[in-house]
Amino acid sequence: MDKTLRSRIIDLIKREVVPAVGCTEPAAVALCVAKATEILGTLPERIELRLSGNMIKNAMGVGIPGTGMIGLPIAIALGAIVGKSEYSLEVLKDVTPEAVEKGKAYIAEQRIDIQLAQDAPSNLYVDVRAKTDGKESHAVISGSHTNFVLLEKDGECILRKVLSDSGVSSDDDVVLNLKTVYDFATTAPIEEISFILDAKKLNLAAAEYALEGDYGHSLGSTVSHFGEKFFGDTPVAHAITLTSAACDARMGGAPVAVMSNSGSGNQGITATMPVVSYARDIEASEETTIRALTLSHLTSIYIKQSLGRLSALCGCVVASTGASSALVYLMGGGYSQVCDAVKNMVANLTGMICDGAKPSCSMKISSGVSTAMMSAMLAMNGHAVSSAEGIVAEDVDATIRNLTSIGRDAMQATDRLVLKIMTSK
């Protein structure tokens, strides 16, 4: 592979696979609030927010690390009180019990106003106005979780970018296909991609943290302690345990960082932990593990390029498809088997809705993990869903585009109805 292309792909992975504390949607809102507060220069008397429906949907039911609370208000308050924009998606890592108490008081004083942005130019859109003593700052994130497109102080422009839709790759991104992804993961000099082990380190630590506590629905802990009777002592059980445990920690508000993928911590977990678990079970070498993790994460990034950051399609569909590709590689398969596994995944999980980030995401992730293993197993035994069946095409990249067009376009009405149901309960 051309060295320049290889370098651009490495830069892409490093942009898309980054640490995050807590759910990335409230983190992005807190980040925008922190930046607006920094520009204002003092704690705002009032914070007014306009958010896209997908941001509200993905933030209203998730735990905020270190607070014991769920939802946007506490994330917003803490973004103003202790948030640091230089931390990016780890913006709330300095949260203390004292800050939480201040945040609760800030909320009780009704200083925060959250509105739906009906005209949001992107599914991922955060518009923050911070006000104090007749002064005002304005910060806008759009298109991706850390992409500031507008910064103003008292009406004076500090930064302005052209708004981009979250479903379109930026000019800096490499236009990928699955063969390029596979070739890169399996041939890049190992020292150039070994940084992906940071995903293993962070997400495994989150899983182990959850297994020692009680977070979310404790699915990982439940499978670990009571699952052998039902699942056996198997690679599938091990992968479900570790993957769901990391999600339990993240969605339950544990004070831990996870490695995200394409702006989603749950996608980062799902692209990482089944691979780590199975590699450990088969005692794979470090190089093999690195290449498998790279294949999983880059496959997920590739699929998200045409799906968009946020959609009605559950992100575990994307990330578990990446994991299935990596499982094939760990099982000794080649590109042909990877293609078969991807087709098997698309035939099975397409249509799983996203109804927000929340503790029960661990259950959806576990469905993705078990399907990833099943799809890889079928592929390794010469079975793939054919182009005569459903939305699967003969060409694997066309199959992926069929998946993403359904999630990006056809499910928009589903997304609106899901949000209506969630906000009307």
Image (tube, rainbow, N blue to C red):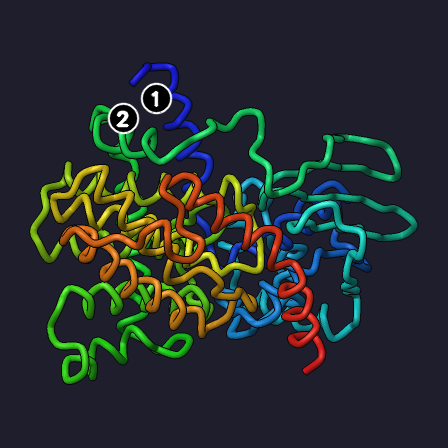
Left or right placement of residue 267 versus residue 181 in this view = right
Task: Tell me what residue is drawn at x 79 percent, y 64 percent.
Answer: 113
In the rendered image of this protein, does residue 129 appear above or below residue 167? below
In this view of the protein, which residue sits in the foreground, 378 or 320?
378
Q: Given contact means CB atoms under 8 Å apart, are the residues at marks 2 and 1 in contact?
A: yes
Q: Is residue 345 visible?
A: yes
Q: Quadrant of residue 100?
A: bottom right
Q: Nearer the viewer, mark 2 or mark 1?
A: 1
- Label 2, on which residue? 192
Amino acid type of the residue tagged 2 in the rendering: Glu
In front of the other: 303 or 348? 348
Residue with the most extreme left position: 283
Q: Earlier in the sequence, mark 2 or mark 1?
A: 1
Residue at (26% x, 67% y) in the render: 240
Residue at the far right in the pictured view: 134
Please state which amino acid type lies under the numbered disc 1. Answer: Arg
Residue occupying the far front of the picture: 388
In three-dimensional space, the C-alpha distance between marks 2 and 1, rounded to whole angstroms, equals 9 Å
Position above or below: 90 against 163: below
Residue holding disc 1:
6
Point out the image quarter for the N terminus: top left
Depth order, front residue of 338/361? 338
Q: Is residue 201 visible?
A: no
Q: Residues within 10 Å of mark 1 (few under 14, many from 20)?
A: some
Identify the element where label 1 is drawn.
helix
Decide: few, some or many residues near mark 2? Use Cα within 10 Å; few <14, some 14-19, many ≥20. few
